[in-house]
Amino acid sequence: MPEDDDGLPTSLLSGRTAAETHMSGCERDGSAWQEETVSEILWQAARPHVMYADFTKRQEGLVGADWLWWWVEGSGEAFGMLIQAKRLHRVGGRWTVGFRDKNGQQMGDLFRTADLFQVPAAYVVYLGGQGFRANWSCGAGHATDCPACARRSVSVLTALQAELAGPSPADGAAAVLNDAVALEDLAGRNPDGPVFDVNLSAAPDDLKRFLLQGQTGARAVARTVFAGVAADRARGFSAAAETRVDIASDAIFSALPDDTGHFREAYFPHVLRGLRHSPPGYVLDALAEAPTTPDIAGHVAGVVVLRI
């Protein structure tokens, strides 16, 4: 990779710009764009700091196919996520995102596959061009040609947050508007200040430092993703957990609060099981174009590696 560029943030900017250009062009022409095509454009334009390996042929009906994303830094530490692509729709005067398509089966399958790979489940949501979102506001400070809204054309939201938002597609769109993070902002961005959580006082010292102090690399990505989930947990009224659960042996934090809160499962292990000392072997195999075993290729459409 070049030594004189700005790294992954610049690559992701290029990818998002290309993706948004495609979406805007289709919208101007009155034609529909597809999640799979946008994903391909995004990753192709995001080289050299992003690489991907596609395990499957593009087939009709493959909408929402799951991809494994691995954020990998030079030290070897990595953060993995299982990602499903979704898009923003406008139905009448309402914005919608179909997180619970097929009567919720698609979301359930996403969680089950994430459990298989021991990573958090999440969505990448394509919001279309800014013209399509003319009356979509990012909040205070929003303006015409808003840079924050432009970055959010490609946004990420955990499946825990998407499920908690409510059952309707309108609930899904509200969750994206309020809680999703721009893909570009995940690349090394830290939440402003410490990440507080109801379980903080009972957390091990290394986990406290992770939450309260700024991080870099894969840990920064994991911390930003976790911060959104912790903010949703803070809106609940149940007590903190007094027990801990052990997770994957290669996880950086192996003993975590066993607090479900108002989510479907304990959120500390769900998110932080993806933060590893090193990426799984199949990541390097895929990028080296080595044969992929059926236990990997049979469950996901491919692997994306984002070099931090």
Image (spheres, rainbow, N blue to C red):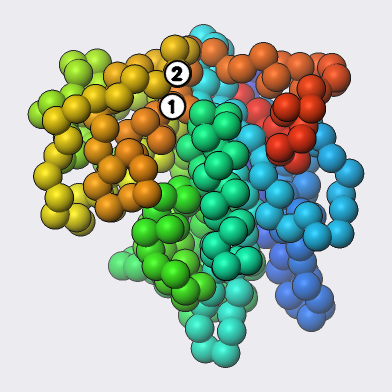
Q: Which mark is nearer the camera, 2 or 1?
A: 2
Query: In the image, what residue occupies the spot 37% across and 59% down?
Result: 164
Residue hosting label 2:
248
Up-down: is 153 above or below 92? above
Query: Do the residues bearing badges 2 and 1 touch, measured as CB atoms within 8 Å?
Result: yes
Between 67 and 260, the one lying in front of the other is 260
The residue sitting at 72% across, 28% down in the picture is: 296
Q: Amino acid at mark 2?
A: Ala
* Residue 163 higher or lower than 6, as above or below: below
Where in the figure is residue 106, as x and y percent of width and height? 61, 56
Name the residue nearer the viewer: 96 or 143. 96
**Label 2, label 1: how far apart the Cα atoms are:** 7 Å
Q: Within the image, what quadrant is residue 35 found in?
A: bottom right
Instruction: Identify which residue is drawn at 61% across, 17% down.
Output: 280
Location of residue 274 in the rendering, given as x and y in whole percent from the top left corner: 48, 27
Q: Is 35 displayed left or right of 173 in the figure?
A: right
Instruction: Please identify the residue farthest to the bottom as the structure is shown.
Output: 92
Q: Residues within 10 Å of mark 1 (few under 14, many from 20)?
A: many
The secondary element bearing badge 2 is classed as loop
**Going by the picture, which residue comes out furthest to the top?**
75
How crowded pointer 2 is (Cα within 10 Å; few <14, some 14-19, many 20+) is rated as some
* Position in image of residue 82 (x %, y %): 58, 39
Residue 61 sits in which quadrant? bottom right
Whether residue 252 is visible to the viewer of this picture, yes or no, is: yes
Residue 273: which numbered mark, if any? 1
Residue 115 in the figure: left or right of residue 43: left
Residue 21 appears in the figure:
no
Q: Where is residue 271 shown, x and y percent of the image?
A: 41, 35
The amino acid beneath tag 1 is Arg
